[in-house]
Image (cartoon, rainbow, N blue to C red):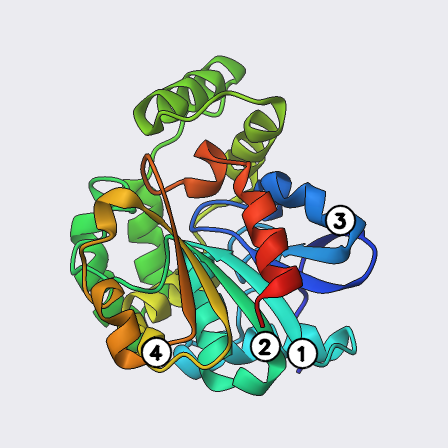
Amino acid sequence: MRIKVFAKVAGVGSPVIFLPGMGWTAESVWPFRLLQDRYTVHALDLPGLGRSAPLPHAANWYDVAFWVKSYCDSQGFGAVRLIGHSTGGVVALAFADQYPERVHQLVLLDAGYQKIPRFPTGVSKPLRYFTPVLSVMTQTGATSWAARVATRAVVRDMSPAGLEQAFLTFVHEQHIPITPSLRVAFYTAMQEVVVTPGGLAFLLAIYRSKPVQAFCRLKPPTLLVVPESMMNRRPLTAIDELGLPILLYEVSGGHYVHFAHPEIVGVVRDFFDHWA
């Protein structure tokens, strides 16, 4: 069964797939537009989150990987390059884990090397504290009920003033410079990403996954962009010991490494061009 995938496609050359973080859409690809002179960049909305259709059933690690494979197959791609931030990085990691022969190179933007916490900090309060319960609900078939609970726990002011205030709060808390492209990405995400049963089932499949195990058996050449404050964490300190094909690039700041440092597109392009 082919699942509808929303993609923003631009550029020339071999394909690069961009997968955004939780709560974001394809528009968050903007720091990587400079790749478009050498690569065709396919920026996707995640399944059930934004404009891509949800997966047809409660998902697991293999379904997450297969979703990427299905898109690649629909486009006639062989091996591809992937860039993923946060949740999108875990999705890219799942694909690289299950289909390593289909991955030329992988770029993880602060993703894949940490365990998923019981109460995920990337989920807004109070929803984060319901996450374990929501996970059980979806596994027992109560996905629609779980989605209603999640929807009631997330309140947004969608007025123009409310959106702008939310944007300014975000850039202030994350210490990110304001750009027109970031504002468009933020507004689009706020307007397009809503809690649906399919989107929630997908997110909870990520919540139940074990990305560190997949990270520690990576085979494709990988660039991990990571905040410098995280460099002393395992498994990052054991990359050489484990013999992993991973190149670390540390930056200042927090989780939104590509928004805070859009210049890393040059590092990514050099990695694609020279490290295989």
Q: Name the N-terminal-most of marks 4 and 1.
A: 1
Q: What residue is pinned by disc 1?
A: 79
C-beta proximity under 8 Å, tags 2 and 1: yes
Q: What residue is pinned by disc 3?
A: 36
Q: Going 19% across and 65% down the picture, which residue do you hit?
A: 234
Q: Position of residue 31 (x, y in %)?
A: 59, 39
- Amino acid marked by disc 4: Ala
C-beta proximity under 8 Å, tags 3 and 1: no
| Within-10-Å neighbours for mark 1: few <14, some 14–19, many 20+ | some
Distance between the alpha carbons at the discs numbered 2 and 1: 5 Å
Q: Name the N-terminal-most of marks 3 and 1.
A: 3
Relative to 176, residue 53 above or below? below
- Amino acid marked by disc 1: Ala
Q: What residue is pinned by disc 2?
A: 103
Query: The C terminus lies in which quarter of the figure?
Result: bottom right
Distance between the alpha carbons at the discs numbered 3 and 4: 29 Å
Q: Name the N-terminal-most of marks 2 and 1.
A: 1
Q: Is 39 on the left or on the right of 133, as rendered? A: right
Q: Is residue 27 visible?
A: no
Distance between the alpha carbons at the discs numbered 3 and 1: 18 Å
Distance between the alpha carbons at the discs numbered 4 and 2: 14 Å
Q: Nearer the viewer, residue 199 or 119?
A: 119
Q: Position of residue 180 (x, y in %)?
A: 62, 22
Q: Is 114 on the left or on the right of 194, as rendered? A: left
Q: Going 58% across and 64% down the picture, which residue do you hit?
A: 82
Q: Name the N-terminal-most of marks 3 and 4.
A: 3
Q: Secondary structure at mark 4?
A: helix
Relative to 145, residue 259 above or below? above
Relative to 104, residue 183 above or below? above
